[in-house]
Amino acid sequence: MTLAEPWRLLALLVVPVLWWLSLPSRPQTAVLTPHLQQWQLALAALRRRPPRWSRWRFLLLALAAAFAALAFAGPRAAGEPGSSRLVVVLDASASMAARGPDGRTAWARATDALRTTLPTVPADVEVTLLRAGGPLLRRHGASARALHDLGDPAGAIDADLATLAADAGRQPGVAVWTLTDGQGGRALPAAGARTVLRATGSNAAVLAVRLVDRWPLPALDLEVDVAAFVDASAIAALRVSGAIAAPSERTVELAPSTVRTEAFAVERLAAGGELSVRLELPGDVLAGDDVWRVELPPLPAPRIAVLADAEAGPFAAVAAEALAAEVGGGVVAAAGDQAVGVLLVEGGAIDLAPGAARAVTFGARLRGAAEAAAWPTPVVADWDRQGALTNGLDLSELRLQRAWRGVLPAGEAFLWADDAGVRTPLAVVAASAGGVASVHFAFRLQDGNLPLLAAFPQLLRRAFVRSYGEGAAPRVRSEPPPAGERDLRVAAAGDDVALPPFATPERDLAPWCVLLALAALALRAFVR
Amino acid sequence: MPPLFPPAFRERLHALIGQRAGFRGAPDARQRARRSVLSQSGTFVGHRPYEHGDDLRRIDWSAYARTGQLYVKQLEQEQRRTAALLLDLTASLHAGEPPRRVPLLRGAAVVGGFALAQLDGLTVLAPGAGALAERTFTGVAAVPELLAHLTALPVAAAGVGDAVGMLLQRGLPGRVHWFSDFAVPSACERPLHALRRRGAVVTGWLPELPADRAPQPTGYLRVTDPETGEELTLPVDEAFVAELRRQLALLAARQDRLFAQAGARLVRWRAPALDDHSAAAFAVFAARCEP
């Protein structure tokens, strides 16, 4: 036993004071009598007791004072040596979702082991849980003990579990417990405790899906890469289903560990929805990588409105017709009270905030723009070869008779002219936070040969798509399975290692001392 | 301790002796013991139950025929008349204000003076007094000697049983004047009955102090028995005084009952003040010494 504050034992000096205080007061008058027996009988008849100093009462009082002083000094009992902190490294890679021989996933078995073991860890041991694999999670204390919000196994292990366990276990007083399935091609951790959750077997996976979206048209092309990590060739079923007009299914023969690509051309539903690609292989232990999902946006029914100034030629109307034919929409009048899918503006001025509405403007001055200045015969210098608008388009034949300086808002340029050696934007995309975008050209259609170029319809369609922003993009819901989490036929071998003993903390004996002091006082009440 | 026998007392003692006549003594027990072996003569004074060791010739067979119980005849021989003073010298007599020892020894002096004046002899037994434990006086001229003897008596720790044993050993039973506070009646019971069995006529003399009826002071007291040294510390209130008064009354009743059962007398007299040597203060002796 140790004392936190030994100097407080000076409080024991109160014991002599208690002794002095416990002495009965001395009577002032002394009487001699031969009849002491009668005095005693009178006392007994009145059921009285003479005040007297009781050795036992004082001893109990002194004992209570001693225990109180001891409690005041902070007595502590030494604890057992051992680890005072536990770091749990939980493999949460995608392969942990594989089912073992008992039909339960390695993840379920790992979390069960944690739920069983962590409550037995002494409460004073600090527990830290590291989820390795997928999004990195750290949980401490009660949250770690309760396994709060661990999620599902996914992704690859970014860190080497063996290194992680060794680093953590190198700190004094830290015990490491690794729970893993041994997949990923790396050795099991040698440091600390470990639990190996075996879940080996055949696995087929959808490795990748390349999507060619013809939005706003319903046509959708998919190229699906699949593979089977089996010992011998296997027959699998590959299904495409969901938000498409006709689900497609085909049987494929998969050679061991060989990637096979299958192409699908489907018609998407106008309402949009989830499209899934599912690979089914009998005996597949890991179902998580068998499905690829994408959220398809609904198809628009675009109404295209045209605004053209008085000097505009027929190009704006022709462009609208071409765009309508390209996206399956129609041309409507540009009335103020009518909602349209996209607005084509040719020349003139318009009260339009850049990026606030879906629009494609050609040489039009926007609200708040400076006075336009004519820019005669600008020479197209370059266009964005990587951007979504002009990628793959040939604009080298674009010739302009005139353009306008000052009509372009701030935005992302994708077409430039050589203005006295300086690249000056001829077209920009102005996007807003809500995903809506407007495309602006610094020249009118009638001032150049853009409508005559072969790339013009495609450029119009891409401008239409771009004006819809992210609302037109399919959202892929599946992550490709990590490379190390696909082949589950062989796992690192190793036995389980039990947890080391944990330290027990110093126990505070002050409450016991207080209890003993109270017990002594209670006993004293019965002693005469 | 104040002077036991101041001149005023001595004058009062001589006056009392001069006025007193007919003090009853008892035959010399030693002569009676010698004579009793030879004859069974004397004046019949009563019966007492037979005790082991009694002379079988003294059994009253007529009484046995009537009652079925063995009784022995008690005879009083009128031979040499003597008296014995049995004095309690224990420390308990120092209790009281004035100390009970003063009126007790003065009373013994008066009774002894009566005996010296009117009887053939007086034996003073003081158990525990060492060389002064037994002393015999003869004639009224020995009164000053008696007073000196009483003055010289120390405080003794010997019990009553020792004194009575000594008395019986000397064969002195006769008229015995026992001066004591009789604080523990149960301790007096056996000696008293033993004296009675041996034919002694016992008179108990108990000087009473005011504290024998009720404690004088109240409050927080330390009460000490001067004989045993035992102490008692206690608060004394009215309820306790009332109860103690009741206990002291019970004690007095027990003392009276003790002497009555032994066929003896117990004479209480109020202890006078130290300097009170009036005739009234000693009237009790003139009145009660004559049966």
Image (cartoon, coloured by chain):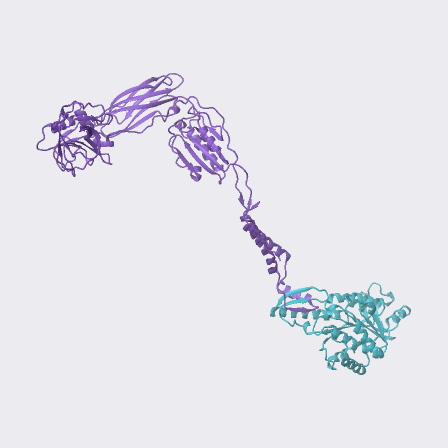
Chain colours: A purple, B cyan
Q: How many marks?
A: 0
Can residue A191 be seen by looking at this rendering? yes
**Does residue B245 sit above or below A266 in this rendering?**
below
Query: Camera-side residue: A115 or A181?
Result: A181
Q: Residue furthest left?
A: A310
Can residue A327 be seen by looking at this rendering? no
Percent position of residue B273, x then y: 71, 78
- Does A474 sit left or right of A339 as displayed? right
Query: Camera-side residue: B245 or A358?
Result: A358
Residue B25, image quadrant: bottom right
Q: Residue furthest right?
A: B38
**Does residue A454 sit above or below A438 in this rendering?**
above
Percent position of residue A70, x then y: 57, 50
Percent position of residue A150, x then y: 40, 34
Q: Quadrant of the N terminus of chain B?
A: bottom right
**Does residue A404 sit above or below A55 in this rendering?**
above
Residue B61, image quadrant: bottom right
Q: Quadrant of the C terminus of chain B?
A: bottom right
Query: Camera-side residue: B59 or A253?
Result: A253
Residue A480, image quadrant: top left
